[in-house]
Image: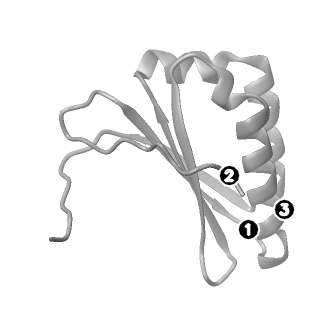
């Protein structure tokens, strides 16, 4: 089991969040989650500016969401230029039927009492 997440969600931070939704055949969901976790442990988490990755699976087995945080847009862009990261992203995309990444900034945070 992976360690507890150190995701930071604070409207006052300048952290960049990449949310990537992969659409997969249900029989490929576990494979993609495993590859995402292995890729994170092997290389992504060792790149400058990496903060955290959280991997979510849909109950219907048709989607995997990757919630990744980077210290800045520059750190994120540097990751995109990293040859090892590029190879991993191609591997992730090869399993998926579609990939929908987008960068986000926290706009508001609400918590229960």
Q: Residue at x 46, y 15 (%)?
A: 74
For label 1, the crowd category at 10 Å Cα-Cα, with few meaning under 14, some 14 to 19 and many 20 or more, is many
Q: Position of residue 45 (x, y in %)?
A: 65, 30
Q: Residue at x 42, y 39 (%)?
A: 17
Query: Up-down: is 3 above or below 75?
Result: below
**Horizontal placement of 52 versus 60: left or right?**
left
Q: Residue at x 73, y 68 (%)?
A: 24
Judged by depth in the image, the label closer to the viewer, 3 or 2, is 2
Secondary element at image label 2: loop
**Horizontal placement of 70 versus 89: left or right?**
left
Query: Up-down: is 64 above or below 79?
Result: below
CA distance for labels 1 and 3: 10 Å
**Horizontal placement of 71 versus 23: left or right?**
left
Secondary element at image label 1: loop
Q: Position of residue 98 (x, y in %)?
A: 68, 58
Quadrant containing the C terminus in the rendered view: bottom left
Secondary element at image label 3: helix
| Label 1–label 3 contact, CB within 8 A | no
Q: Residue at x 62, y 22 (%)?
A: 79
Q: Position of residue 16 (x, y in %)?
A: 39, 32
N-terminal of the pair, mark 3 or mark 2, is 2
| Mark number, residue 2 | 2
Judged by depth in the image, the label closer to the viewer, 1 or 3, is 3
N-terminal of the pair, mark 1 or mark 3, is 1
Q: Position of residue 93 (x, y in %)?
A: 76, 48
Residue bearing mark 3: 31
CA distance for labels 1 and 2: 23 Å
Residue bearing mark 1: 24
């Amino acid at each position: 089991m992976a360690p507890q997440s150190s995701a930071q969600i604070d409207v006052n931070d300048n952290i960049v969040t990449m949310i990537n939704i992969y659409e997969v055949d249900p029989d490929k969901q576990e494979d993609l989650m495993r590859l995402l976790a292995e890729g994170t442990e092997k290389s992504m988490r060792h790149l400058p500016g990496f903060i955290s990755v959280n991997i979510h699976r849909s109950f219907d087995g048709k989607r995997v969401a990757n919630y990744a945080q980077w210290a800045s847009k520059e750190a994120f862009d540097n990751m995109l230029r990293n040859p090892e990261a590029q190879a991993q992203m191609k591997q992730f995309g090869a399993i998926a039927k579609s990939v929908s990444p987008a960068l986000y900034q926290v706009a508001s945070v609400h918590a229960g009492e």
